[in-house]
Image (cartoon, rainbow, N blue to C red):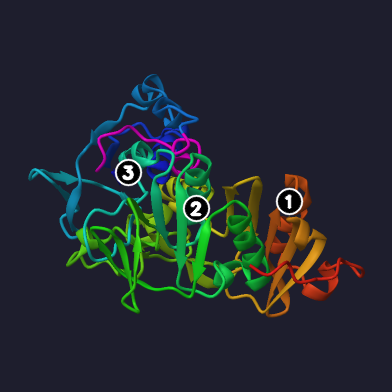
Amino acid sequence: MVVGASAAGLAVAETLRREGYDGTLTLVGDEPHAPYDRPPLSKQLLAAEWDTDRLALRTPAHLDGLDLDLRLGTAATGLDLERRRVRLAGGDAVPYDALVIATGVRPRRLPGAGAHVLRTLDDALALRERLTPGTRLVVVGAGFLGAEAAAVAGRLGAKVTLLEPAPVPLAHAVGGQVGAVLSRAHLDHGVDLRTSVTVTEVTEDGVRLADGATVEADEVLVAIGSLPNTEWLADSGLAVGDGVLCDRYCEAAPNVYAAGDVARWHNPLFGTSMRVEHRTNAAEQGMAVARNLLRPEERRPFAPVPYFWSDQYDMKVQAYGRPRGHDEVAVVEGDLAERRFVVVYRTGDRVTGALAVGMPPKAIRRWRQAVASGAPWHTALPDERPAAAAPPKA
């Protein structure tokens, strides 16, 4: 049984079938929609460049071919580990021999009513309908999701104000220099970016700040992170803490695994536990979990190099590894001021991440191998590399 019918859950189901499992396979999803891709929600779908049909991860015929007991629009409400049953909204208790938890995350919200969030297809369509030329949009949170939405909204003619509590957006994740580059892009495209600003609540007229001031808006989008969907596991006996806690095989309890955004597992490549909210990881982890379930005697640790990308204005951002928590960042190609560069990250004495802006994929792909092999910092970096000149101030 797989609870969660998005990228990770679908990857589990497909891999089980592809590798020979022909028994009963139940796939439960709380949304009424068949599995769809989420990254385009804040990009192509929000910009009205794609119709909803293009988001489908698989065709109806493909899903039919998987021979699933597919239960959409049905939330899981509880788990009985001892009896091996999952309780569903409506009262059903579905038995299982093995369980995969892939229930994803939900957006964090602010006090007050009327704000948009951006996690589901319905969220994106509701926001898109309101983004008409001249609409005053306040985006709370200048992380990747908020930045993407701000870029699209500005292109659609909205007047965008982007509010961020940190002095430099994304500095905690990608470093201050890279964060400053991304911030400058907002300003250059007419976004009113305000940093070191804390929003306390959504009001009828916009948002209220910690100092009591109000920023007026016609629409508000809250993009301040997410919470793992684990509340249905309360009192189940599973260990939960910022996700479902798993070992290096992604197993949370005997014959219970987790995959995707909700899974916090020990990644032996980095020697730490992590929870990754990226599309590529969801699919890869789903496949790994399915194989570990099918062949427990041949289980393999899940030790990926995480990958993510973001589209903002004319910039393509790509990253491998774990830049967060780095000790040093170095420019190895290009120029920060031109928004075309590759930077790599050091944690301890090894290369642990790489990020590119405005560069072809091959420019950063070779650094993926450096991360995967745990390459020593002093031998991985070229002897001569671009000076890390500070970008223009945001």
Over which residues does the magenta segment extend?
30-47
| Whole-number angstrom distance, CA of label 3 to CA of label 1 | 33 Å
Q: Tell me, yes or no, whether the highlighted magenta stretch contains residue 38.
A: yes
Mark before the other along the chain sequence, 3 or 1: 3
Q: Main secondary structure of the magenta part?
A: loop
Amino acid found under the numbered disc labelled 3:
Asp
220 vs 190, left or right, is: left
- Location of residue 290 by image quarter: top left
User: SS of the residue at dot 3?
Assistant: helix
User: SS of the residue at dot 2?
Assistant: loop
Mark before the other along the chain sequence, 1 or 2: 2
Amino acid found under the numbered disc labelled 1:
Arg
| Whole-number angstrom distance, CA of label 3 to CA of label 2 | 19 Å
Question: Where is mark 2, residue-wise?
Answer: 278
Give the camera-side residue of 194 and 229: 194
Question: Where is mark 1, residue-wise?
Answer: 365
